[in-house]
Amino acid sequence: MDPTKRHLLVILDGWGIAEDPSVSAIDHADTPYVDSLLEENPSGVLKASGRAVGLPEGQMGNSEVGHTNLGAGGVVWQEILRISNAIEDGSFFENEALVEAARHADGNDGILHLMGC
């Protein structure tokens, strides 16, 4: 890469590429400037939902998730998926804080409430 050449990362929040262009407001809009940028310059398409951005499959991403993954340069597993993965692989039940909380509740005739998605 030539260090004398300038590069620009442009993020258009909310600008997406629909699988079905017939239902896309962007595909129906008159966007000559953006169209010319895409035609005349190198560009790429990133996935912005599901496991590609650390979310459960089918879950739409958002600005925060997108910027986090871009800044990291790769997938950053979001809490909801980190917890689900930990339950699936069993490591959730080896979490020292969780195990101690369960023991405390059990030993004191208490109730342990776990909340989440």
Image (cartoon, rainbow, N blue to C red):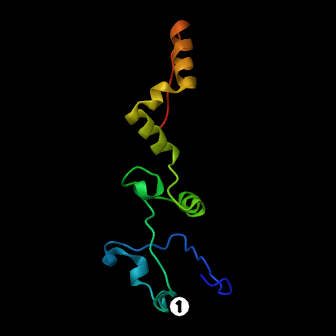
Q: Quarter-wise, where is residue 101 in the image?
A: top right
State the quadrant of the C terminus.
Answer: top left
Front-most of 34 and 77? 77
Judge whether residue 114 can be spotted in this image.
yes
Q: In percent of the image, x 42 and y 40: which residue is there?
A: 85
Looking at the rendered image, the quarter that the N terminus falls into is bottom right
Secondary structure under tag 1 reads helix
Whether residue 109 is visible: no
Q: Is residue 68 above or below residue 79?
A: below
User: In the image, is 36 to the left or to the right of 1?
Assistant: left
The residue beneath circle 1 is 33
The residue lying at 58 percent from left, 24 percent from top is 97
Left-right relation of 115 to 7: left
Q: Residue at x 41, y 33 (%)?
A: 87
Q: Nearer the viewer, residue 74 or 103?
A: 74
Amino acid type of the residue that numbered disc 1 sits on in the rendered structure: Tyr
**Residue 13, percent from left and from top:** 55, 70
| Position in image of residue 47 (x %, y %) | 43, 65
Which quarter of the figure has residue 29?
A: bottom left
**In the displayed structure image, the side of residue 98 where residue 50 appears, left or right:** left
Q: Position of residue 32 (x, y in %)?
A: 49, 92
Q: Is residue 76 above or below residue 25?
A: above
The mark tally for this picture is 1
Q: Position of residue 109 (x, y in %)?
A: 52, 7
User: Please, which residue is most extreme toward the right here?
Assistant: 4
